[in-house]
Image (spheres, rainbow, N blue to C red):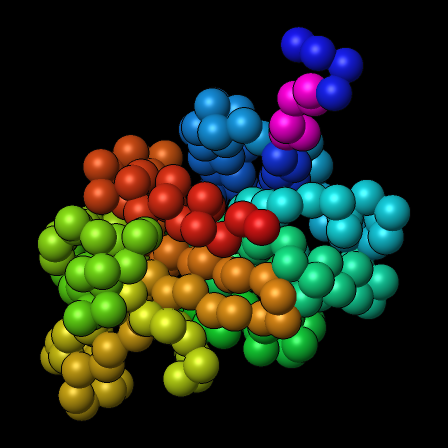
Amino acid sequence: MTDTQQTAPAKSALVVRGGWDGHQPVEATEMFLPFLTANGYEVRVEESPAVYADDSYLPTVDLIVQLNTMSSIEAAEFTGLRAAIEAGTGFAGWHGGIADSYRNNSDYLQMVGGQFASHPGKRPSERTGEQSDNYVPHMIEMTDAAATHPITRGISDFELVTEQYWVLHDDYNDVLATTTQAVREWDPWNRPITSPAIWTRNWGAGRIFVSTPGHRVEILQNPNVKTIIERGLLWASR
C-alpha cells in the first residue's frame, strides 16, 4: 500500500439489548453479531439505552440494533437516539425489542411507527401459564411492495407458530408484510384484524426497520425470518 492509499474505515454498529429475559436478548442478538462482523461492522454491545445519551459517540454509529423489551428510556437517552436517527443512523430490530421497548415515551412510539398491543393466544382451556399459551399458527403475508424490496425480494408468504403481534400503527409505514388476527369464539372482536408484520420507515435522514416475528431464538432461526432480519439490518444502515 502506498502512502496515499488508505483502507476504508469499518462501519460502526451498536447493539442495545436488555429488558424482559423471555425474549432472550443476549442469545438472540449474539446470533447476528457474526453477520455484522462479516459485513464490515465494528460492533459495540451495551446492556441498556444509557449509551444513547452519549452525544459524542452516537452520531458516529451507522446502525443501531435494538432488542430491549418492556423497558423505559430517559429523556436525554431518547433525545440522543432521535437526533442520531434523524442525522442518518439506521435503527433496526425485531419483536418486542423494538416494537414494545419504551411505553413511557410517545415520541419513541411515533418514530418507530408501531406499538405492540396484544398477542391473542390459544383457547383459554388450553393455556398452562407458559409463553406457549400465546403461540398460534398464523401466516406472514407479503405485500405487493415486498416483491421488489431488497429486504423481502424472493420471499413468499410463510407460516409461523409463535406470538402473533397485534400492532397499533399508522400509514406512514412502508409495509412489506402483514398478519391477520382471526376471529375466535373466545375473543371480544368480531372481524379479522390485519397488522403490519414487517415494515420500514424513514425518519429524517435515517431508516428504520422492524420485524414483529422474532419472539425467541427458534423463530429467528427460521430461514425466512433470519434472511429478512439480516437484509433489514443492512438496508437500515447508513
The residue that appears at 30% across and 74% down in the rendered structure is 195
| Residue 174 appears left or right of 102 | left
In this picture, is 138 found above or below 44? Answer: below
Residue 180: quarter of image: bottom left
Asked if residue 8 lies in the magenta stretch, the reply is: yes
* Quadrant the N terminus occupies: top right
Q: Position of residue 36 (x, y in %)?
A: 50, 31
In front here: 130 or 39? Answer: 39
Q: Main secondary structure of the magenta part?
A: loop
Q: Quadrant of residue 10?
A: top right
Q: Can residue 69 be seen from the camera position used here?
A: no
Residues rendered magenta in the picture: 5-10
Along the horizontal axis of the image, is 207 left or right of 200?
right
Question: Quick one: 236 or 29, which is closer to the camera?
Answer: 236
Q: Is residue 3 above or below residue 172?
A: above
Q: Position of residue 86 (x, y in %)?
A: 67, 66
Q: Residue at x 24, y 78 (%)?
A: 194
Q: Position of residue 160 (x, y in %)?
A: 18, 50
Q: Toward the viewer: 68 or 158?
A: 158
- Report which quarter residue 144 is drawn in: bottom left
**Where 31 falls versus 234 (above or below)?**
above
Q: Is residue 214 visible?
A: yes
Q: Position of residue 113 (x, y in %)?
A: 49, 73
Residue drawn at point x = 37 percent, y = 44 percent = 231
